[in-house]
Structures are given as C-alpha cells and as structure tokens.
Amino acid sequence: MTEAVVLKPGRDKSVRRRHPWIFSGAVAALPNFEDGDVLPVRAADGALLGHAYFNKASSIVGRMLNFDGLPPLEALGASLERAIALRRRLFDPGENAWRVVNGEGDGVPGLVVDRYADVLVLQVSTLGAERLKAFFVEILEKGLEPRTILERSNLPSRKEEGLASTEGCLRGDDVEAVDIIESGLRFRVGFVRSQKTGFYLDQRENRSLVRSRAAGRRVLNVFSYTGGFTVAALAGGAAAVDSVDISEKALDLARTNCRLNGSDGPGLGFFAADAFEFLRGRDLAAYDFFVLDPPAFAKRKSEVVGACRGYKDLHRLVFRGAPPGALVLTFSCSYFVEEGLFRQVIYQGAAEAGRRVRILHRHRQSPDHPVNVFHPEGDYLKGFLLYVD
Ligand code: SAH
C-alpha cells in the first residue's frame, strides 16, 4: 500500500471540515514520493482522512480529491460526473456555453473546463491535475462527446507548481474560434492567444442584468474584452454603446460580436486605450450607464493595497463625471479584495468625487462557477449595481 502523508496533531481540522487544501505547515511526515502523486492522508492518530495529490514545490502542498475511503480515481470520476449533471440541470439544451468543471468548486482541484458549443477547453493549474489529464479527458469525452478538446493551460500560477505554459489540441481537429449562444445572443469565442479559456462565462447573469437595464441608455463598457456587455446592452435597447479595452484584438472580436447580433454602425464606438487615460480624457456626462469589469488588480495578498488604490481611482473618475441618474455596474474579480473591502473602496471613491452613491443590487459569479461551501476561496467575483444621484 502507498505510504500516507501524516498531518500534525490538531492540524487535521480543516481537512475534516472538507477544506481541500493542505498547507506544508500542517504536515508532520511526508513519505518518499514523486511530486504530483496521489497519496492517502492520515490524521496524527492514524485515521484515514481521504486522498490528495501532493507537490512539494507548492505552498499548498496537497489538494484533497476525496474525503472517504473510496479509491481516489473513482471519487474523482464521480465528481466529474456530478459536475456535468449539475450543468445539464442548470441550463436549457439551447444554451451551449457553460463552465463544466470549476476546480475546487466541483471537487476537482486544479482543473477548469469550459464548454463552447462542441469545443471543450481545459485549463490545468497544478502538477497533480496535469498528471491526471488523460483520465479527465477520457471522462469528459464520454460524458459530453465534444468535437474537439483544447488545452489553454496558461495561468501564471503554474510556475509555482513547476509547470510551463501549454496550449494545444488534445482531441479532434484544432479550431481557432467557435460561435456560441448565450441567452439567445451569439458570440464568437477565439482560442488564439485568448484570455482565460476564451470568454468570461462567469458574467452570464450580469450580462442579462445589463440587457434588462439598458433600454434607452448611453452605455460605456470599460474593460470590454470581446464585448459581452456591449452586445447585451444593444440587445436591451441601449441608445449607444462605447467599448474600451487595451487589447485591439479583443475589440476586433467585440465588433464581430456586435455584427453577429445584427448591430453595426451608428451608436457604436470602440476605443483601444488604457481605461484610466480614457476616463480622464473623456466627457463622461455623455454616458448614463457605466460597466466596469477590470482584470484582477490583486493576484496575491501582497497586492491588495495597490489594488484598492486602483479600484478607488477608477470609481472616483467615473463618479466625478457621471451625470445624475447614472447607473454604474462595477466588479472586482480579485479574491483577495473581499466584498466589504471593495464596498469601502467604492465609498471612498464616491466621497472623493463628492457624489451620493447607492447600492441597488449585489452580484456574484454565475451558477456554473459554483463555490464549494468548504472552500470559500472559490468565491472571487463580486459586483454592485450603483446609482449615482
Ligand atoms: N467584461 C469582459 C471581461 C473583462 S476582462 C467580459 O464580460 O467579457 C478584463 C479586460 O481588461 C481584458 O480584456 C483586458 O484586455 C482589459 N484591460 C486590462 N488592463 C487594461 C487597461 N489598463 N485599460 C483598458 N483595458 C484593460
């Protein structure tokens, strides 16, 4: 039998509460093993807690795959099947773009899988998951019968695991792009040097919200990427929509996405620019609905202070220029900037701009990005719909 990892006395509590991460400080004894191996995990008194894969190079040395006596691959296979079954319940058959597997949120640490029509895109973030890739691919193929499976494992966090970036085609014919349907709207998702796996599926509900509030509004979509909120606003009857992103390539696709939904021409503006410079140089009274969806300003804990300065500046600029009655839909996808802190930063921006700002709604990631209640770290996206008097 494989030798087990033994935890220090009293340090088994979080695993017993089903938190999947084991930090190196909690481990009393590591047996000989190769990084990436799956090993049994035992409490100091010898009780079997489950199985995890381990990597000595990472500060999160182990990630639990199961919390019982089941063979770990059997447990993982069951987690994947549960993940697929949940999405089938969540979405009508006409919806063909959703996150299939959301890492720890689905009990499969280190693995994200997005479905775009008949293309699956995998993102592997840990060595343990890398070693299980063939197993994952086999189950996904059986469960979803995709035409193509791509890999876009390009997360910076792979470095900490001792892994290089890899992109490629794992099954079927390589494809550069595919068209998806989301809530009746059509989007082209590009896979060549794309961000994330190609599209921000986590904003699905929030795109619907924009659609429902956009009628007659003049919208400024800041950090637009490929125009998800732009298309949603147009579908909701917006009078005009300007999109700003630093990436020309993302804006090209945003233009395509507008055309795919029958919108072309007047009332649409695309600006390849730094968002902060754009906001400083523009008369913002021309807009009455702002969408702010920046990249994560804090990717680690040590960056929180700088990130808050960035969020505050962004909000001050928008609040200063927004006309009375404007809506501001704003997001932070930095896990480390928790909701209370984000709200405080928004208040500071409002105070500095001298505006009265109220919260109308609070928003989170879409339900195909479930958060395991034992793993609050998975709860990263928070948003507010604000009203500026
Ligand atoms: N709202 C988008 C996702 C935004 S992702 C959607 O729903 O699809 C964040 C975007 O911010 C990326 O497209 C990135 O190119 C852009 N970005 C990053 N830094 C920027 C900056 N300083 N100014 C403008 N855009 C920026």
Image (cartoon, rainbow, N blue to C red):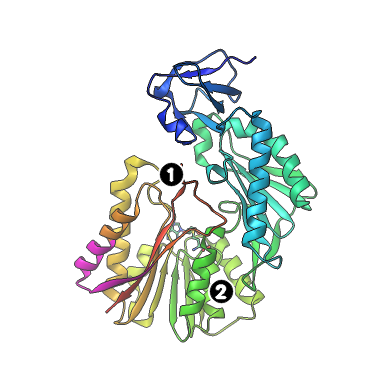
Which residue is labeled 2 in the image? Answer: 231
Mark 1, secondary structure of its residue: helix
Q: Is mark 1 within 8 Å of ligand 1?
A: no
Q: Quadrant of residue 331?
A: bottom left
The nearer-to-camera label among 1 and 2 is 1
- Locate the C terminus by quadrant: bottom left
| Residue 377 tag number | 1
Bounds of the magenta segment: 346-361
Q: In this rendered view, identify the residue nearer to me: 365 or 241.
A: 365
Could you tell me the amino acid type at mark 2?
Val
As for residue 350 lying within the magenta part, the answer is yes
Give the mark, 1 or 2, whose residue is nearer the N terminus: 2
Q: Is residue 226 above or below residue 99?
A: below
Q: Secondary structure at mark 2?
A: helix
Query: CA gap, disc 1 to disc 2?
Result: 31 Å
Do labels 1 and 2 touch, CB within 8 Å? no
